[in-house]
Image: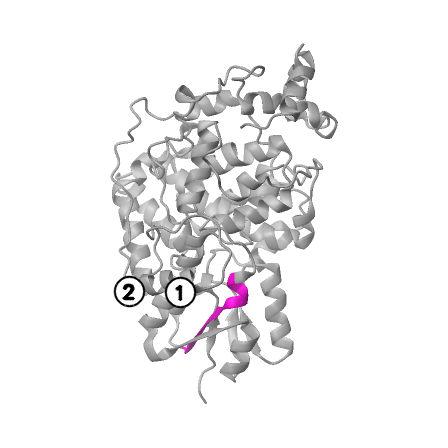
């Protein structure tokens, strides 16, 4: 009897390397139209699927249909599938299973920790500290451990990884790996031009891996030339260097082309051999088997209800200039640069996401569900499971503190210290009133006034709230910011 085909979603293309089974790939027009995705995000997913089909040859069946159901019915035989990456897709797969179109739902291969092991760890915890989860991950998988103790005697070297950018604006690292486009990419670009899709962002050269071979080359380039400088400057921003020392491996990771354990083990080898400092290696490992896995598991653990959380009652719709990525009318250098990065690449690094884009949205009261959807669709590494904990929990404090113990709000002083944006900006990070008042500095104090009651019970906010109450011009700042139209 022939082995059942394995249906792989577009973010599971890497799963084919561990099996000799026939593979079904479906390019669903309805799925492409469902959201307003970044043009380059669609390119990456379609390119990854089509490259895989070419690599597998006769072992692959590639169907272009309007819906997934149409493809499965056309295929004519029940298929197996790995658990997908969203609540909506999971419900669809379970429905297909009840109808006999799907036979077995297999565990994902994109994460080190299984859902069952996470639930055992979670137990009856009311709160989930990432640091606790991260230490368990290190111990469980034996990563950066010297016996029962963390390598170097410290679990977390985050305090060593907060250096401001160098004054000369140059980290002294080679450029990141850049894949070469081929005939498959040409066909994808032509098809996207012809499809009736409402996308956001610019088309552009493919910057991220879509095959296993490309992903391994990108990993090697990072380990050889960029890992050593990653740690100290991982929270810094340089206007003229969008990639800095970041690995740029989130796309191949989220396509299943790399496994998290192979990344962290390879990074640990560089520390053990003396080729990379501990703070850089630990910072990278924390991102991969700490935060990334934590985000995945809490998406499922908290369920759909988490997506509706709005502790600060933020109800402002995303403005058109934000949704359209119109960076030119934006005056603030930091915000304009971040929006331009999303428009041109569908990617900016985590501090720009949290402390520029997220900080602005938090201060201006953008609706957290709308913002979460925007991050998931406008970023090339964004998927439904990625963003809720990052945005609702970490960035917008919409869950009331389940994830982060305080809101990640800051004034312009933080941006001035951690970037090179402010020196040439029309706004002054030291000012909260006037035509040149920084929208982040003024917005910070207006945010505290707006949310004083909601944050009153948070002991980590007691000092900032007290400082806000002592400002003689707080009401004037509030009036200025509620009327602000230029950012």
Say how many tags the image has.
Answer: 2
Q: Is residue 345 above or below residue 211?
A: above
The residue tagged 1 is 191
Q: Mark 1 or 2, which is nearer the eye?
A: 1
Which one is earlier in the sequence, the residue at label 1 or at label 2?
Answer: 2
Foreground: 430 or 135? 430
Q: x, y (%) of residue 291?
A: 50, 44
State the SS at label 1: helix
The magenta segment: 21-32
Please tell me which residue is depicted at 59% across the width and 70% down the height of the picture.
93
Q: Residue furthest top?
A: 472
User: Which label number is shown at residue 183?
Assistant: 2
Foreground: 192 or 102? 192
Quarter-of-image position of residue 304:
bottom right
Please tell me which residue is depicted at 27% across the width and 47% down the height of the picture.
221
Image quadrant occupied by the N terminus: bottom left
Q: x, y (%) of residue 71?
A: 51, 77
């Amino acid at each position: 009897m022939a082995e059942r085909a394995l249906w792989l979603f577009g973010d599971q293309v890497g799963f084919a390397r561990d099996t000799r089974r026939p593979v079904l790939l479906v390019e669903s027009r309805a799925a492409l139209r469902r959201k307003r995705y970044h043009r380059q995000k669609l390119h990456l997913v379609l390119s990854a699927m089509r490259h895989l089909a070419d690599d597998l040859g006769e072992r692959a069946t590639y169907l272009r249909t309007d819906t997934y159901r149409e493809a499965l019915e056309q295929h004519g035989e029940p298929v197996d599938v790995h658990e997908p990456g969203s609540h909506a897709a999971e419900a669809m797969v379970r429905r297909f299973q009840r109808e006999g179109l799907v036979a077995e739902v297999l565990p994902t291969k994109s994460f080190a920790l299984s859902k069952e092991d996470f639930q055992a760890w979670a137990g009856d915890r009311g709160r989930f500290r990432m640091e606790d989860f991260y230490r368990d991950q290190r111990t469980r998988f034996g990563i950066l451990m010297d016996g029962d103790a963390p390598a170097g005697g410290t679990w977390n070297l985050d305090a060593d990884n907060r250096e401001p950018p160098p004054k000369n604006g140059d980290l002294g690292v080679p450029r990141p790996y850049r894949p070469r486009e081929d005939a498959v990419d040409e066909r994808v670009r032509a098809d996207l031009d012809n499809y009736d899709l409402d996308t956001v962002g610019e088309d552009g050269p493919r910057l991220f891996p879509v095959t296993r071979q490309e992903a391994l080359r990108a990993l090697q380039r990072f380990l050889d030339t960029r890992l050593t400088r990653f740690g100290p400057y991982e929270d810094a921003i340089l206007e003229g260097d969008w990639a800095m020392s970041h690995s740029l491996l989130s796309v191949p990771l989220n396509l299943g082309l790399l496994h998290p354990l192979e990344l962290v083990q390879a990074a640990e080898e560089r520390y053990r051999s003396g080729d990379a400092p501990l703070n850089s290696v630990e910072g990278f490992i924390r991102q991969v088997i700490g935060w990334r896995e934590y985000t995945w598991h809490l998406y499922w653990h908290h369920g759909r209800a988490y997506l509706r959380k709005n502790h600060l009652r933020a109800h402002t719709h995303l403005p058109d200039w934000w949704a359209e990525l119109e960076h030119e009318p934006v005056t603030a250098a930091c915000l304009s640069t971040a929006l331009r990065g999303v428009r041109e690449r569908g990617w900016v690094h985590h501090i720009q996401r949290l402390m520029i884009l997220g900080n602005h949205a938090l201060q201006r009261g953008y609706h957290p569900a709308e913002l979460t959807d925007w991050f998931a669709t406008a970023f090339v590494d964004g998927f439904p499971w990625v963003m809720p904990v990052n945005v609702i929990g970490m960035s917008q404090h919409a869950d009331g503190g389940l994830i982060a113990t305080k809101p990640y709000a800051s004034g312009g002083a933080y941006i001035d210290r951690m970037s090179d944006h402010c020196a040439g900006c029309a706004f002054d990070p030291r000012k909260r009133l006037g035509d040149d008042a920084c929208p982040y500095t003024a917005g910070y104090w207006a945010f505290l006034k707006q949310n004083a009651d909601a944050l009153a019970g948070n002991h980590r906010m007691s000092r900032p709230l007290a400082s806000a109450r002592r400002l003689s011009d707080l009401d004037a700042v509030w009036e200025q910011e509620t009327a602000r139209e230029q950012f």
